[in-house]
Image (tube, helix red, strand yellow):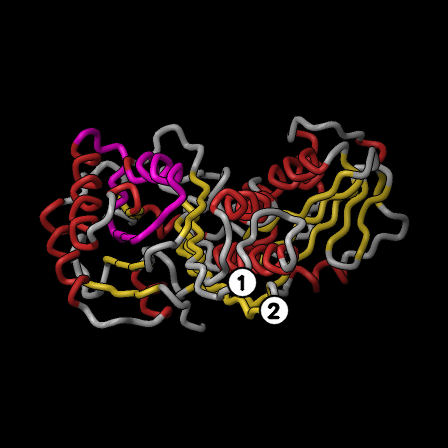
Amino acid sequence: MPEIAGVAKRVARARYKEWDRCDLTYVEFDAGTVVAGVTTRNICCSSEVELCRDNLKGGKARALVVNAGNSNAFTGYRGREAVEAITNQVAAHLGCSPTEIFVSSTGVIGVPLPKDKAQAGLRAAFDAPLCNWQEVADTIGTTDTFAKGAKAIAIVDGKRIEIVGVIKGSGMIAPDMATMLGYIFTDVAVEPAFLQTLLSEANSSTFSCITVDSDTSTSDTVLAFATGKAGNAILTGHDDTGADAFASALHDVCRQLAHLVVRDGEGAQKFIAIHVTGAASDGSARRIGLAIANSPLVKTAIAGEDANWGRVVMAVGKAGEPADRDRLSISFGATQVANNGLPVDGYDETPVAAHLKGQEIGIGVDIGLGSGSATVWTCDLTHGYISINADYRS
C-alpha cells in the first residue's frame, strides 16, 4: 500500500501481554491534519472512546496511539488516568495540545492499562525506525489471523488522491456506528466537518452492515485522518469538484475493510452476503438482514452446509419489522427456494447444496412489501469460535 504524505508510522513493544511481538502503534501527522470518526454506542465504552469523542470536536490530529492486548475498558478512574498520561506524553513530545492526540486500546476488558508500560512503549516508539503498513496492521491485531488493509485512489481537482486503511477485529463484532479498530489515512485536503459527513455516510452501508457474533464492542472506533498534502482545493461539500470521486473511493476502502473483518471472523469458514429487498424501508431491510445474519441457527446451518431455509423464515419473522409470511421469497445463490410464502414447485435441493459447499454464500430475501433494500455481511458459526473465546484470557 502507498505511503501517505504527512503520515509517519512506528511500532514498539510495550509488553502489555506475555508475547513476542510489537503491541504499540504510534502514528504522527503533520500539522494541519484533520480528523473525523465514529465510535461504539456500547454504553460501557472505554475511556479511550470517551476521550476520542471529546477530541473529535476539535477536528485536528497530530498523533494516533493504538495499544493491543488490553482494552482498558471498565477500569474506572485508573483507565482514564492511563489515557490522559498517554495523551500528555505524546502532546509534550510533539509540542501540541492533548486534544490533538487520539488513543485506542483493544484486548481484555476489566484490566487497567499499565501506565508504566504504555509510557515506556511510547518512548521506544518515538525513537523507532519508520515502518510499513504491514507492520501497523500486524501490531494493532489481537485474535486476527491475518493483517487487514485496503487502498483506493481518486482524482480530485486534477490531483491524485491516495487513501489507505488498516483494521483489526475478528470477534465481538456487531458494529453500531463503528467497528473494532479501523484507521483510514488520506492526503486529500478536506474540511473536517465534510470528512465527518463522508465517513458517517460510508459507515452506514459498510461497517454498520457487518456482524460476526452480534456483540458490539466497548472499544469500537473508526478514525479517518486527512493530511491535505495532495494540494487539491479544499473539499467543503458534495457539490465541490471531485467530492463524489473522493466519497466513492472512501466508501470503497470502508467496504473492503469491513469485508476483511467478516472473512477473518473467529472460527469462520464461509463469507455470507445477505441481500434483502422489498422491505418497507432501507432501514427495515438492514434490520431484517442483521436478524438473519445474527441468528445462531442460520449461521450453524451454513457451517454445516445444510439447506435449511426455514431458519431464514424464522429470522425474518423475529426481526420486529414489517413482513408478510405470504409474500416472502427466499433464494440461496442463484436458486429460488421459496416464493410468495410457499416452497417453489419442483424445488431441487441439489444446486443449493452445491452452493453451500463453497466459501462464498449468497442469501436473497424479498419481503414483498416495498422498495427498501440492504446488504448485510456475516460469516458462519463453527466450533472454532467457541474454542477461541472459551480460552481467550488463558
Whether 81 is drawn above or below 232: the answer is above
Would you call the spot at circle 2 few (<14 residues within 10 Å), some (14-19), or many (20 or more)? few
Whichever of labels 1 and 2 marks the residue nearer the N terminus, that label is 2
Q: Which mark is residue 351?
A: none
Q: Is residue 93 visible?
A: yes
Would you call the spot at circle 1 few (<14 residues within 10 Å), some (14-19), or many (20 or more)? many
The foreground one among 349 and 323 is 323
Residue behind mark 2? 158
Residue behind mark 1? 232
Q: Amino acid at mark 2?
A: Gly
Q: Where's residue 172, x and y in %?
A: 41, 44
Is residue 155 rendered to the left or right of residue 4?
Answer: right
Q: Is residue 270 visible?
A: no
Q: Residue at x 69, y 28 (%)?
A: 321
Is residue 184 rendered to the left or right of residue 199?
Answer: left
Magenta-colored span = 48-77
Q: Residue at x 44, y 56 (%)?
A: 226
Structural distance between the alpha carbons of marks 1 and 2: 7 Å
Whether 259 is drawn above or below 50: the answer is below
User: Mark 1 touching mark 2, by CB under 8 A?
Assistant: yes
Report the quarter where the N terminus lies.
bottom left
The foreground one among 345 and 333 is 333
Is residue 177 rendered to the left or right of residue 360?
Answer: left
Q: Where's residue 371, x and y in %?
A: 81, 39
Whether 239 is drawn above or below 233: the answer is above
> Element type at marker 1?
loop
Q: Quadrant of residue 131?
A: bottom left
Q: Where's residue 336, x and y in %?
A: 81, 52
Q: Where's residue 328, x and y in %?
A: 81, 38
Q: Residue at x 80, y 29 (%)?
A: 324
Q: Quadrant of residue 125?
A: bottom left
> Element type at marker 2?
loop
